[in-house]
Amino acid sequence: MNIPSPLSKLAICCASFLLFSLSFKLNALLDSFALYAPGVNLVFVPAGIKLVCLLLGGEAAALGLLLSSIHASLSVWSDTSLAEMASFSIASIGSYYLTIQLASRAMGIDDTLGNLRYRHIVILCMLVSLANGTIQNSVYLIQQKVLPQDVLASTAAMVLGDFLGCFIVITLLNVGIDLLLVILHRREADQNGFHRVAAFLRR
């Protein structure tokens, strides 16, 4: 029996919130060597979770990610107003969401992700990382969280961290899904793991 659309969207929203929150806690384990500055990591696993959730869950995932991002910001920034933290989160989630939408249309990726290929994922990883690093650091500059002379270095560090986080998560997820399908003898030549997951979520 299919899950009613409103309930499915609520489940996606909640799952995205939880996954993003957990990924922040996981990434904190890397802070001893990967933390470049507050809000900037050289390996940022939540970026990959963000990309996967938005690819599979669309607007419902975006809402859950936004709420989770604001919640996570409370532990990252001190002496920062809720409005400022909201602006960081909107820039972060919004840059990913809009880039995914525009890039997917440009590459002809359909809503079911049935024609999504690994090369598309690599391109998406690069584009969302560049967009987020640029937009996020512009907001940091406006909010005086980064000095003008440091903004280029901070942007480059964030782009690198987001790309590595996206690439790591996407690769592990795709390999994991493919292995599971092989074990279950349900792998089909014209479908990938993302297509199956997306088809289930968007019923």
Image: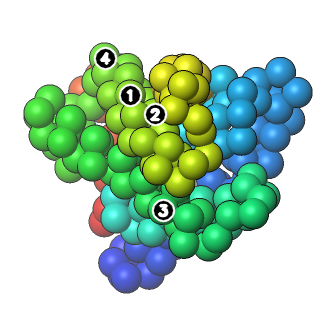
Label 3 crowd (10 A; few <14 / some 14-19 / many >=20): some
Q: Secondary structure at mark 1?
A: helix
Mark 4 or 2, which is nearer the eye? 2
Please rate how many residues cluster around mark 4, counting C-alpha atoms within 10 Å: few if below 14, some from 14 to 19, many from 20: few
Q: Quadrant of the C terminus?
A: bottom left
Question: Disc 1 marks which amino acid?
Answer: Leu
User: What label does residue 139 carry, if any?
Assistant: none
Secondary element at tag 2: helix
Three-letter code, disc 4: Arg
Residue 202 % position (x, y): 32, 62
| Residue identified by numbered label 3 | 87
Q: Earlier in the sequence, mark 4 or mark 2?
A: 4
- Mark 2 and mark 3: span between their CA atoms? 14 Å
Closest to the observer: 102 or 115? 102
Earlier residue among tags 2 and 3: 3
Which residue does the image show at 34% across and 58% down from the upper left? 58
Nearer the N terminus, badge 3 or badge 1? 3
Mark 1, residue position: 130
Residue ID for mark 2: 133
Give the CA separation, mark 3 to mark 1: 18 Å
Residue 21 percent location from the top left of the image = 69, 57
- Say which residue label 4 marks: 119
Q: Visible in this render: residue 179?
A: no
- The residue depicted at 13 percent of the width and 40 percent of the height is 105
How far apart marks 3 and 4 lie (CA) works out to: 32 Å
Where 56 falls versus 148 (above or below)? Answer: below
Q: Is residue 113 above or below residue 59?
A: above
- Give me the C-alpha separation between circle 4 and circle 1: 17 Å
In what element is the residue under mark 4? helix
Q: Nearer the viewer, mark 3 or mark 1?
A: 3
Circles 1 and 2 in contact, beta carbons < 8 Å: yes
